[in-house]
Structure formats: C-alpha cells, structure tokens
Image (cartoon, rainbow, N blue to C red):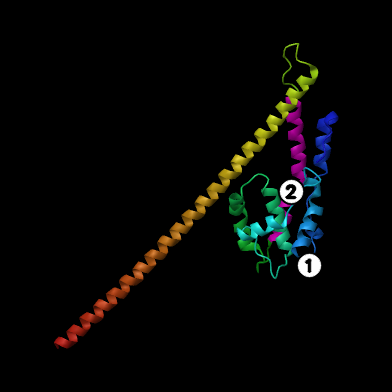
C-alpha cells in the first residue's frame, strides 16, 4: 500500500481500492516444493509488503507452522493447493494474532475440511470468506474517510506559536490514534471470541471425559455384579 503524504485521504482510498486477494483459480493445480511455495506466495502477496525487501513467508516460518501443528504436514515434501490456502489465512492472521490464537481459529477448520471426503472443503471456505472482500473495502473506505475528516477537526484551537506544519502533524497523530483504537477494539473482540470458543471446546471435552468415566465405572460395576452373582451361584451349587 503506497501512500502519498500530499494527498493523504485520496491516496489511502485509492490504495484500498487496489487491494485484492489470491483467487482460488490463480493457485497452481499441481503440488509444490518448498522453494516453489515461497516464490509463489511472495509474488502473489507482494502488494501487502511494507518494504520491498520483506519476505512474505520463509522456509523457517512454514516449517515452524507445520512443527506447531498449525499447518498440515506436506506429503512427500510437497504442498497442495489447500496448503497454500491455509498459508494465506495464516499470513493475514499472524499480523494481529499470536500463533496460539491462530491455532484456535484455524485448526478446527483444517482438521475437518483439509483434504476432506466431504462435498465441502477448504477452497469452498476460502472462496466464501474472500468473496466479501469488495464489499468490505467499500465499508473501510467510508469508515476511514469519516475518521480522517474527524481528525481534521482536531487541534483547531491551539496557541498561535504552534505552526501550521505542527498542527498538521498533530492532526495526523489524531488520525493514527483513531485507526489504532479501531484495531485495538477489534483485536480485543477477536480474542474474546477465541477464548469463548476455546472454553466451549474444553467444556465439551470435560463432559465427554466424564461420560466415558461414568460408562467405564458402570461397566466395571456390572462386571463386578456378574462376578458376585457367579460366586453366589457356585456357593449355592456347592452347598447342595
């Protein structure tokens, strides 16, 4: 995203309008080796890099994702189209979330839909999520325009010894603070949703464990009752 300081708002809006995502049809239909994966991702997501020399994904990153069970392991050192889709999700999430939080979000999806026999897979999920991108960009443009215009109304009543340049810097600081607060609130909301989902999963696991223990205890009790009954029958037969 390239921003022109002289025409800040229009530059931001134009940059937002150029935002695009990697479409499923742009993904190769053959499995790729690691070097091919990093080259593909770097070329497809180059527009999102802050500096030209930045790397979108490195071999070390991808290996760590697989090692930490965030990314399903490659098959014979090759990565499928679904691996690439998972990596794209990870790339966007990792800018604001911890690896642990990404696992909470992504693992239930990949566990169920990665290389699935269902008539619904990771590509279907990716397409459904990213088809909303254009509408969301329009919403972002409106929201950012509102925040920018609001920031331009700040620091109007300041001492005369504050220059117009300093005043512009303060207004830009206000704009950055408004954008930052928006990100902060949304990050907090995402984390709360993740924690809620994790707590629900743990509750279900505990309930399942309790049910299994109860079933096991019931089975042992029944087995014990049978043993007692057999012993009693043997004693009765002996007494006769």
**From the image, which quarter does the C terminus lie in?**
bottom left
In the rendered structure, the answer to whether residue 41 lies left or right of residue 72 reads right
Q: Which residue is mark 1?
A: 30
Question: Is residue 210 depicted above or below 178 in this figure?
Answer: below
Asked whether residue 125 appears in the rendered view, the answer is no
Mark 2 and mark 1 lie on one chain; the one further toward the N terminus is 1
In the rendered structure, the answer to whether residue 20 lies left or right of residue 59 reads right
* Residue stretch rendered in magenta on the structure: 122-151
Per the picture, the main secondary structure of the magenta-coloured stretch is helix
Q: Residues at badges 2 and 1 in contact (C-beta under 8 Å)?
A: no
In the rendered structure, the answer to whether residue 184 lies left or right of residue 123 reads left
Q: Give the camera-side residue of 169 and 214.
A: 169
Element under disc 2:
loop
Q: Is residue 145 magenta?
A: yes
Q: State the residue lying farthest toward the top.
A: 160
Q: Which residue is mark 2?
A: 132
Question: Is residue 74 depicted above or below 175 in this figure?
Answer: below
- Which residue does the image show at 65% across and 33% down from the upper left? 181
Q: How far across and how far down the image is residue 55, in percent?
A: 76, 50
**Crowd tier of the residue under label 1, counting other residues whose Cα lies within 10 Å: few below 14, some 14–19, many 20 or above:** few
Q: How far across and how far down the image is residue 68, in percent?
A: 60, 58
- Which residue does the image show at 70% across and 49% down from the upper left? 92
Q: State the residue lying farthest toward the left.
A: 239
**From the image, which quarter does the N terminus lie in?**
top right
In the rendered structure, the answer to whether residue 27 lies left or right of residue 198 reads right
- Which residue does the image show at 62% across and 60% down from the upper left? 67
Q: Quadrant of residue 19?
A: top right
Mark 2–mark 1 distance (CA, rounded to whole Å):
27 Å
Can you tell which of label 2 and label 1 is closer to the viewer? 1
Q: How far across and how far down the image is residue 12, in percent?
A: 80, 36
Q: Is residue 156 magenta?
A: no
């Amino acid at each position: 995203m390239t921003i022109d300081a002289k025409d800040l708002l229009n530059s931001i809006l134009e940059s937002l309008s150029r935002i695009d995502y990697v479409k499923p049809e742009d993904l190769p239909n053959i499995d790729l080796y690691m070097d091919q994966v990093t080259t593909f991702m770097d070329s497809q997501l180059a527009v999102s890099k802050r500096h030209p020399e930045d790397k979108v994904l490195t071999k070390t990153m991808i290996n760590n994702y697989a090692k930490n069970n965030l990314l399903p392991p490659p098959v014979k050192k090759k990565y499928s189209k679904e691996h690439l889709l998972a990596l794209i999700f990870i790339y966007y999430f990792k800018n604001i979330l911890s690896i642990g939080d990404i696992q909470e979000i992504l693992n239930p999806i990949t566990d169920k839909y990665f290389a699935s026999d269902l008539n619904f897979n990771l590509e279907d999920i990716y397409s459904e999520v990213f088809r909303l991108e254009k509408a969301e960009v329009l919403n972002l443009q409106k929201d950012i325009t509102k925040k920018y215009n609001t920031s331009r109304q700040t620091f109007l009543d300041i001492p005369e010894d504050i220059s117009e340049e300093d005043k512009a810097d303060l207004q830009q600081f206000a704009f950055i603070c408004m954008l930052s607060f928006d990100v902060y609130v949304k990050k907090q909301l995402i984390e709360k949703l993740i924690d809620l989902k994790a707590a629900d999963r743990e509750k279900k696991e505990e309930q399942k464990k309790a049910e299994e223990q109860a079933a096991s205890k019931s089975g042992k009790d029944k087995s014990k009752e049978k043993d007692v009954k057999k012993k009693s029958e043997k004693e009765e037969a002996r007494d006769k």
